[in-house]
Image: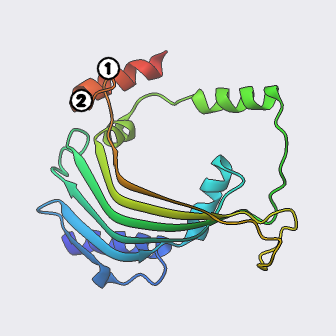
């Protein structure tokens, strides 16, 4: 069973990771722990999602040194804490050549905010997502704007790149007081928020 599941997961990972090899993954369903090392993401698989949310950014390359996970119980995954630990992420972002800066009027912004605020009912995947704790040791990204000439050929017309490093990032779900809470408190808070 474990080999079959790892085969299915490996098949999906090969779509998301450039040059994926099964040796990069160590996982055990019995312990609920796994790790994948030295990963270069297939950015074309992620760019359509990024462009929908941030139209002036396109991923050029993303490298993850180590991604580890710990699931305390697969049998009770909707209640079990899930820990994801990432050592380092190195990302290069560029301005898409086809991006045209536009001025949004007040109606466009209000429509975008209203659409983003609509949520489907609180369900199983929301509960699983609320159980996730994400720890990232270091994120280093570089953003290269194209300037007014919109060319990838570097020269004196190319604006300087923006480089940013962030250390020790942590994502947790919170209760109604903004504190890291028990799964029940987080579900109660998020379920109530979705019903409004």
Tell me the residue that label 1 is attached to: 177
In this view, 173 is above or below 92: above
Determine the residue located farthest toward the front in the rendered image. Answer: 156
| Residue appearing at x 11%, y 61% in the figure | 31
| Residue appearing at x 82%, y 36% in the figure | 104
Q: Marks 2 and 1: CB-CB under 8 Å?
A: yes
**Is 146 or 50 nearer to us in this picture?**
146
| Residue appearing at x 30%, y 72% in the figure | 36
Percent position (x, y) of residue 126? Answer: 38, 37
Quadrant of the image occupied by residue 46: bottom right
Locate the N terminus by quadrant: bottom left
Coloring basis for residues? rainbow
Determine the residue located farthest toward the top in the rendered image. Answer: 196
Residue 1 visible (yes or no): no
Badge 1 density bin: few <14, some 14–19, many ≥20, Cα 10 Å: few
Tell me the residue that label 2 is attached to: 181
- What secondary structure is found at the residue carrying circle 2? loop
Relative horizontal placement of residue 9, taking residue 142 as reference (left or right)? left
């Amino acid at each position: 069973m474990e080999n079959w599941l790892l085969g299915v997961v490996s098949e999906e990972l090969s779509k998301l990771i450039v040059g994926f090899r099964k040796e990069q993954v160590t996982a055990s369903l019995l312990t609920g722990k796994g790790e994948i090392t030295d990963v270069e993401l297939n950015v074309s698989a992620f760019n359509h999602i990024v462009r929908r949310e941030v139209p002036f950014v396109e991923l050029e390359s993303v490298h993850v040194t180590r991604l580890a996970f710990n699931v305390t119980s697969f049998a009770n995954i909707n209640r079990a804490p899930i820990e994801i630990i990432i050592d380092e992420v190195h990302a290069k972002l560029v301005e898409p050549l086809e991006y045209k800066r536009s001025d949004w009027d007040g109606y466009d912004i209000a429509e975008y905010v209203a659409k983003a605020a609509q949520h489907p009912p609180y369900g199983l995947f929301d509960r699983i997502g609320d159980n996730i704790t994400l720890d990232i040791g270091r994120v280093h990204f570089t953003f290269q704007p194209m300037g007014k000439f919109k060319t990838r050929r570097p020269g004196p017309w190319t604006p300087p790149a923006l480089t940013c490093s962030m250390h020790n990032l942590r994502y947790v779900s919170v209760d109604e007081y903004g504190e890291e809470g028990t799964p029940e408190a987080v579900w109660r808070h998020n379920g109530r928020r979705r019903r409004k």
